[in-house]
Image (cartoon, helix red, strand yellow):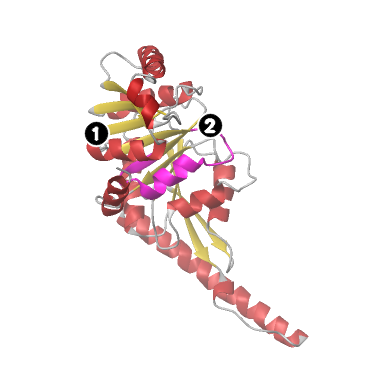
Amino acid sequence: MKKFSKWMVGIDVTKNEVNLLRNVSELANQFTPDAIHIVHISKELDIPKEVLVDIPDLMMPDIKQAQASLEEMVAKYFHPEQPVEIHVLSGNQLTELLRFENTHKIDLAILGRRNMNRVGVLSKKMVRKSACNVMLMPDRHIQNIQSILTPIDFSEYSDLALAVVSDFQNVELPPVVHALHVYKDATKYLSQVFETADEIDQILSKRTEIDKKLTAYAKHSLDDYLAKMKKTSVQKHIASVERGKSVGQPIDQHIDKIRPDLLVMGSKGKTMSAAALLGEVSESVLPHNGQHITLILKKNGENKGFLSGILNFSR
């Protein structure tokens, strides 16, 4: 978080996003970014261009009202010394947020998550298409981060996640950090049609033996990785997933069990992308999956070419 110096907060003044601003202000107190851009995108009116030529300031009252509302909220929830700038734009939400991110060289895009059990369409598109790190903020006030969960698959993105976790630990009362490694169980390696009871007994015995070895290997791999990353105090968790099942399921289950304040994960990994995982989490029936902050990390330059293509096409 310390290296994220320019933040963009996408906000909708027509919705109650008080907790979004309060949480951003709390994080800014801890990590002191150089700039916090509060951005509201007003939808363009579906009016013929011929009419707008005669009335070019048709949207001006809405823009002025949004500006006044944002100024009032910023004055209420941010300190005067915090480097907050307000921007009221018009157009397509996704396109304008991506354009703003690109123009202002944003490191961290922050969006609110008002629905606790579903990830919104705009949020998922930002995770897929943004070139910067993306944070999804729940609709509850989180005064301090007391627990963090990070899925670990030993990729470069796991390294990024643990580096950010270290930033959150540099406080007087550091949060409890949980590392979760999800591995494929024996069903990944066993595929056979059974015809007799003896064959079933044999394969079940073989599966039990393979599962024991896979579990031991997963524990050993996680121990070695965390030792290499000098994170020996982290609480370790492993979970298996059957062939054909999503790694999102055990992650969901651990979120429900641990109730973290913050989930940190890379945008990609050895198993799936964060966008795909968010899509699956959004369909989950677990009631607590939207109560935490979700931070999705990207490597420098990720999606840059794709983002330029989108912005050039939308002009």
Say which amino acid is labelled 1.
Answer: Ser
User: Which sits earlier in the primary sequence, circle 1 or circle 2?
Assistant: 1
Q: Quadrant of the N terminus?
A: top left
Is residue 291 toward the left or the right of residue 127 in the image? right
Q: Residue 169, how many percent across, how many down?
A: 35, 37
Q: Is residue 132 magenta?
A: yes
What residue is disc 1 on? 5
Instruction: For residue 134, say whether it is visible.
Output: yes
50 to 287, vertically: above or below: above
Say which amino acid is labelled 2.
Answer: Arg
Q: Residue 72, how many percent across, how many down?
A: 39, 12
Residue under the image location 71 percent in, 85 percent down: 194
Q: Residue 106, how many percent across, how many down?
A: 27, 37
Pointer 1 local density, CA inside 10 Å: few below 14, some 14–19, many at least 20: some
Query: Which region of the structure is painted magenta?
Result: 113-134
What residue is disc 2 on? 114
Q: Quadrant of the C terminus?
A: top left
Q: Is residue 151 magenta?
A: no
